Image (tube, rainbow, N blue to C red):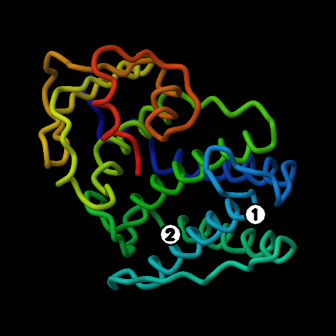
Amino acid sequence: MHGSDNNDVSYERFLTEFDDHNTAFRKAALTAGPDADVATCPTWTVLRLVRHLAGVHAWVLACIADPHGSDARGERPPKEWDELLPWWDERRAELRAAFDRGPDTPAQMMFGFYAPNLASWARRQAHEVAVHRLDAELAAGAEPATFDAAFAADGVDEALTMIIHRRRGGWSDVEASGAVLVHAEDARQLWSLTLTPGEPPTLGERAEPDATLSGDADAVYKRLWRRPATVSITGDASLLDPLETP
């Protein structure tokens, strides 16, 4: 199979993932405590990590509240831990309730390549929380989660077809050139990307790769998000740098 269109993961499944990863994130954050360092987000503490996620949830709520606007701004989370936790719990519950309106419900979406609706936000938020769950678990000294192959492969697809196009500063300074093959082995999914200097990567039919990233979907997903993972890399590893998430 070449890539995916995320039809393998249903809207309801994304909502379940959103719930499960939020629950695990909260547990790990409480275990670690607000002052614990988050090694996977340099200079961040768990307090900042929770503020970030709470702020994202508030921002998405603002996008849902003004579906046809263009510059949604969410409420700013409290800075103190004892105030932040209940505030985040409230925003998270509000967002989860909003998702129950259904996938076709319009919502403001500032990212290109995503449809402006709750289906896109459910997918994006499930992966947002999943990745930060890893950060919290690592900060707590716990074994980080292993993600289901279908969900992880969807995260790989989102990263390669959508997220990497948000590169800060654009692509004009990227000099990488070549073909990269990404293989989520247990999910039986392949992504073949062509890198051209100064241009965003393009996804196409499989070509002879100059670099290959392969492993279980869980590991490839984590590697693309720059989290600890055991993967196989062959060829010119520098070609993978532009494919990492911003």
Question: Few, some or many C-alpha atoms within 10 Å of disc 1 (few <14, some 14-19, many ≥20)?
Answer: many
Q: Residue at x 56, y 26 (%)?
A: 229
**Quarter holding the N terminus?**
top left
Vertical side of 194 occupied by 235: above or below: above
Query: Residue 60's spot in the image, x, y percent?
Result: 50, 72
- Going by the numbered disc 2, the residue's amino acid type is Arg
Question: Is disc 1 placed on a helix, strand or loop?
Answer: helix
Question: Residue 36 or 58: which is nearer the viewer?
Answer: 36
Of circles 1 and 2, the one toward us is: 1
- Tag of residue 101: 2
Q: Is residue 195 left or right of residue 110?
A: left
Question: Few, some or many C-alpha atoms within 10 Å of disc 2 (few <14, some 14-19, many ≥20)?
Answer: few
Figure quadrant of residue 202: top left
Q: Residue at x 35, y 38 (%)?
A: 157
- Tag of residue 63: none
Q: Residue at x 47, y 33 (%)?
A: 221
- Tag of residue 47: 1
Vertical side of 42 occupied by 104: above or below: below
Query: Residue 225's spot in the image, x, y percent?
Result: 48, 41
Q: CA distance from mark 1 to mark 2?
A: 31 Å
Q: Residue at x 46, y 64 (%)?
A: 102
Query: Residue 175's spot in the image, x, y percent?
Result: 18, 41
Question: Residue 149 or 78: which is nearer the viewer?
Answer: 78
Vertical side of 122 occupied by 207: above or below: above
Query: Residue 49's spot in the image, x, y percent?
Result: 67, 59
Q: Is residue 72 left or right of residue 17?
A: left
Q: Which numbered disc flags the more N-terminal residue, 1 or 2?
A: 1
- Going by the numbered disc 1, the residue's amino acid type is Leu
Q: Is residue 7 left or right of residue 138?
A: left
Question: Residue 60 or 213: which is nearer the viewer?
Answer: 213
Question: Is disc 2 placed on a helix, strand or loop?
Answer: loop
